[in-house]
Image (cartoon, grey):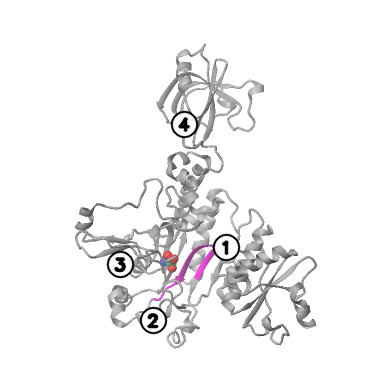
Amino acid sequence: MCGELRAEDSGRRLTLAGWADTRRDHGGLVFVDLRDHTGKTQLVINPERAPGAAEVAHEIRNEFVLQATGEVVPRAPEAINPNLPTGQIEVQVDELRILSRSTPLPFQLDEEGVDENLRLRYRWLDMRTERMQRNLRLNHTAIAAIRTVMDERGFVDVWTPSMTRGTPEGARDFLVPVRLQPGNFFALAQSPQLFKQLCMIGGIDRYYQIATCWRDEDLRADRQFEFRQLDLEMAFVEREDVLDVMEAAVVGAFEAAGVEAPPRPFPHLSYAEALLRYGTDKPDLRFGMEIQDATEITRGSEFGVFKNAPCVRYVVAPKTFSRAEQSRLEELAKEWGAKGLANLTQISKFLSERELEAFGVPEGSTALFVADEEPVVARVLGFLRLHLAHELDLIPAGLDVFHWVTDFPLFEHSEEFGGWTFMHHAFTAPLPEYEETLEAEPARALGQHYDLIWNGWELGSGSIRIHRADVQQAVFRVMGMSEEEQRSKFGYLLDALEMGAPPHGGFAMGIDRFIAQLAREPDIRQVTAFPKIASGSDPLTGAPTPFPDETLRELGIRLVEPPQPDR
Ligand code: ASP
């Protein structure tokens, strides 16, 4: 309650406990700011009134844990601190105890720019900062609100195993050796995907879980090895029913956090449209600068680069660039995979009146073109659009734009496997019109998959699932799986799909990503109590660590030289 005392509390006698935020000695009087997660209160210790307490007060250093008893008194007018909620009062202490001491700190709690590894090494100190207190408590508030929404809508929280068979979500598995079965491993669940589908077949028609998932991927701002999802599944539903629940969960969390909620329903964008207009399947729609297509208009162009390229597109940036700025943008475009980046002013002499008219660029703006294969053009202009938005400060602060991306391709061609693989996972149903033709024309098949995007962050994915074994097997066949392989890896799913599987669909939203965005933090480490760093280790415990040979022997494991990391 250190932050809760107000002028009306004057005259109350009470006992406070917390951490010493600062101590100041003023000619006999000692002032200590006592802090807990609610805020700070100023303690005054007067050696004349409380000699014992004054003696104790001299020993106090930052972050000592104290218990103080005394009376709340109004501050003298000149001592009022209008910047502090408790700035009208102070506590005249008569009893003071040090409950616990602290060694000198590796960093001060109010220090700016403390190295993140140091913060994580001493996370218990970092957690005492206002920022971490706010973020961890926001986690709780948002999740509690989401649970309420799920509960009100009849969802049942079913716990699913972490240690399982591989659950393919497109990442590497973390393996768990098993002492009772040397040479065999569990995989840590990349998601509860198949278990939640089995719940549907098992008659739990509304399942949800705040599920921990494990994926062995490189760590990034929005990725940790382990993370949480709001994981849900519903039987006898269509896409709109799933989206409706997700939107309600998002809005519920916003309201609980006291942040203005985005208007519902969230707008939809098809995958094809997203790539065409924004160059990515997770566009940031807080600003315009849409990509324009110039492929048609440049078919007969005199400018060879345009004429010979399968795709020509451009963005119009609201600025003119110096030669140096233009070269920098060209360098970036090349890093992103383009052969070049053409500025309309530099190439206008090669273009016809008709082309110039079509591009109609306003005064003070610049049209920047990429000509190449379509995926390259989309990717480069997508990156360029985002880069320019940040560079030119085009993103309005405090704006939240949520939207759905729908109708993804079911498969993508994988160089690695030399064949077709799923775009999200293998259990997404095709749109009905592609059900019959998906084996003959996998490239054309669209899936009933949807992603939720918030300000350019992919918050999560879901789909209407395949609920027929024959369709599931067709998808497996497109992926090059023999009957035998299908049976050995997914026999249990195929059996279940043949024993009365209702139509079903669901979604999973990355809770840590969601909370990071809600807290306006740049990465999920800031909302995770004990995260790992980019190298994949935990600075606090020092994990991962080697284990003694006897332990490994018991598990039937012998170490060999690890392969070079493939990054
Ligand atoms: N299992 C998927 C994932 O973890 C989400 C889903 O399709 O429900 O991304």
From the top left corner, tell me how far across and down residue 542 is, in percent. 37, 48
Q: Is residue 344 left or right of residue 115?
A: right
465 in magenta? yes
Q: Residues within 10 Å of mark 2 (few under 14, many from 20)?
A: some
Q: Amino acid at mark 2?
A: Val
- Secondary structure under the numbered disc 2 in the rendered image: helix
- The residue singled out by tag 3 in the image is 165
- Check the image and report above or below for 254 versus 474: above
Are discs 1 and 2 less than 8 Å apart at CB? no
Q: Amino acid at mark 3?
A: Arg
Q: Amino acid at mark 1?
A: Gly
Q: Is residue 270 left or right of residue 352?
A: left
- Secondary structure under the numbered disc 4 in the rendered image: loop
Task: Tell me which secondary structure the magenta stretch mostly adopts.
Answer: strand
- The residue singled out by tag 4 in the image is 63
- The residue singled out by tag 2 in the image is 471
Ligand 1 lies in quarter:
bottom left
Q: Which residues are magenta?
A: 450-466
Q: Is mark 2 within 8 Å of ligand 1?
A: no
Whether residue 285 is visible here, answered yes or no, is no
Instruction: Give the Cα separation between the discs numbered 4 and 3.
Output: 47 Å
Q: Is residue 185 left or right of residue 20?
A: left
From the top left corner, tell me how far across and down residue 288 is, in percent. 67, 66
Which of the pair 552/273 is nearer the observer? 552
- The residue singled out by tag 1 in the image is 456
Q: Can you tell which of label 3 and label 2 is closer to the viewer?
A: 3
